[in-house]
Each structure stands twice: as structure tokens, then as C-alpha cells.
Image: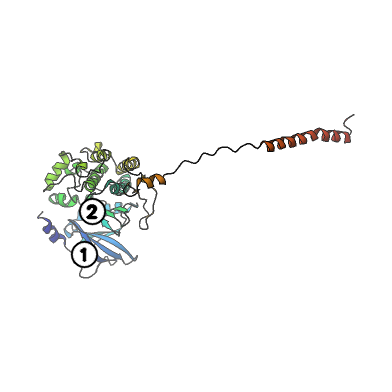
Amino acid sequence: MGGKSAIWECYNFITMTEPTLLSNRYQLLEMLGAGGMAQVFRARDLMLERFVAIKMLRPDFSANTELQVRFRQEAKAAANLSHPNIVTVHDFGFDQGSLFIVMEHVPGTNLKTMIDNLGKFSPEDTLPLIIQVCAGLGYAHRAGLVHCDVKPHNILVTPDRRVKVTDFGIARAIVGINPEEQNDVVWGSPLYFSPEQASGQAPSPASDVYSLGVVMYEMLAGRPPFVAKTPETLARLHREMKPQSPSTFNPKITPELEQILLKVLAKEPVARYRTADQLGRVLMTFGQHKPAALPVQAAPMRSSLSGAPTVTIKSPDMQPRAAYLQSLPTEEPYEAPAEIDWVSVGLGLLALAAVGGLVPLWLAIFFRWNNVLP
């Protein structure tokens, strides 16, 4: 590849001087972003009268007949995923020389922009976001799908901190393109791919877990675990080098959290958490038993956009310890049994005796009246 400028020249195939119509249905309104293999637009679905996001692949990718078949297969598989933490795929097609995929429009920004703007995240801010990513990825893993390109660019965060994972299967669909472009285009960025992907092996759910571990490391440490000038060097680091302790960059990272993160970044897939579901459960348990902060509260708070349950974490900085202790449920007060009213008991016994004494009298009258007694 001839550098980033060459990539831009290669795929800058649509100019938004005026709205463009795709498949006589989708009106492109504005460009939301661009990468090495596609452009993303905010668009309007004229048939259903709603806003959508459309990703258009580069024309040189789209012209590949084999890629067109794989792209449709992956788009169909992604369209079958229905989860609050996964961007919904509505449609796909081919127009103006480009393959495109139509997805729900998610307001907000991607996690990479947040990292660039905010720098290091605290554990309290990191865990709720990563747990939601685990929920979305775990659902896909149970459906037999591997994302293959987990990175902060593909993790969308709404203004109310709801997370949506996007671009399922697109990287896998493009795996057959020119091998010289795979490192820079197919896997999005060598910063996030797993050691087995760096070795050219097929990715698995554990590969997605590793890539998510790189994202989590970058959020907490303010930088990825490995940085190099060339994709080849990055691939070697992912395969061979042990990452530096993230607590070196962020002292708020506890030894327990660091242990979880380093396990996620294990070189061998069998040494990691096998699926995103498993990692999510571990992080939930860690949050609930974290000694230095308040427990994770997993009450299902519904979003007006996605209806996704979220997890909020309150730290001592957000709620003083005194207020926290006051908010804890207290034991029910112990109530002593009521004293016995002996007067009432005595009157009851006398009444019972009086009634009991009348029984023989009534029996005698009954038998005499009926001439039973002699």
C-alpha cells in the first residue's frame, strides 16, 4: 500500500455535492466516516421514512464477483442477529458500482473517538461499556458468528452510554482480497487482531475476546498494549511479546482487574476466556465484589433507542461512603412478642366452662322428652 493518502485517493468515490439515491430508495445525506475499505453515510429510507446508516465498499472491492457472493452471505447472517447491543442490519445491495449494507442509524460516536478525546478511562467507566460489548458479541458467538474485526471504531456509544457493536462479518467477507492489503484493510488495524489472526489462522470466538481485551487495555491505559511502525512488527508483538502491566499507566487498575485483562490477552486461545459471554460474567462478578468501589448494579434500565439493559457502576467518588452506607438496606427491627392478657384468658376459660356445663343439661332434657330415660 502506498500510505494513507493513496487509500483516500482510491476510495473517495462519492462526492456529496447533492444527495445521491441508491437503489431508488436510500437517499444519502452526509458522510459520517471513512476507512480503508468503505465510507459510511447517514441516509434516509424513502420507503419506510426513517434514517439509516449505509456503508459502501470501495469499488475495487465491490467489482470482485467472489466478494459479492461472500458479502451477501455475511450480510444475511448479520441480518439474523437481533440483540440490543448489536447494530441491526436492514438491507444490502449493489448500486453505482459499489456494494452497500443498510444498518440502523445509531446516534452518538464510536469508542475510538471517545478514547482519543478522553484519554484514560477509569475502571468504573470501562466496565459498563465492555460488559455491554460482551453481551452483543456473546449473542453472536452463540449464533455461530465471529466478528473478526473487534476494535473501538466498530463499537458505537450513544449519548446515554448504550453500546452497539457494528460491522459483523464484513472483514471476514473481504478476507480473499489482495493479501498485501489484508493487514491494512481486512483486519481494520493490526493494533487489535489476535495472535492467531496475525499468524494467518482462522479466527474463533476467543479471537474476538483477545481483540476486545486490546480495546479494554487501551481504554484503561490510554494506549494499546503494542505499538509499532509496521503491520509486520505489530503481528510479531501480538504473537510473541507479553504486554506491559496496564497498572503501570493507570494506578487505578487493581491487581484483580489486571489479572483478568492479562488472561484475556493470553497468546494461546485456550488460555483465554473462550467466549465473550464468559468474559462478561467474569467482569460482572468482579464489579460486584470489587472492594474499593460500590457494587455493580445490574437493574434493567431501558433505553428509548435500543431497550438494552445496562449496567451502572457508582464509585466512592460519585457517591460518598456515608451516603452509600445510609443507602444500604437495614435489618428489620426486632419486635418483642406482645404481653399475655391474663384477664381475657380467664374470662375465656369461664365462658368455655359455662358452655360445657350446659351440655349435660340439654342432653337430659332431650332424652326425657323422647322417653329414652327410664
* Residue farthest toward the left in the current orientation of the protein: 2
- Spatial distance from mark 1 to mark 2, Cα to Cα? 39 Å
Q: Give residue 170's position: percent from left, percent from top.
A: 24, 53
Horizontal arrangement in the rendering, residue 40 relative to residue 335 (left or right): left
Local crowd at mark 1 within 10 Å, few (<14), some, or many (≥20)? some
- Label 1: element kind: loop
- Label 2: element kind: helix
Residue 92: image quadrant is bottom left
Does residue 271 appear in the picture of this structure?
Answer: yes
Q: Give residue 177's position: percent from left, percent from top.
A: 16, 52
Q: Give residue 317's position: percent from left, percent from top.
A: 31, 48
Say the numbered circle drawn on residue 118: 2
Is 200 rendered above or below residue 181? above
Residue plotted at (39% across, 44% down): 325
Local crowd at mark 2 within 10 Å, few (<14), some, or many (≥20)? few
Amino acid type at image mark 1: Gln
Point out the tag, 1 or 2, that comes first from the N-terminus.
Answer: 1
In the depicted view, which residue is nearer to us: 165 or 117? 117
Horizontal arrangement in the rendering, residue 197 relative to residue 306 (left or right): left
Does residue 199 appear in the picture of this structure?
Answer: no
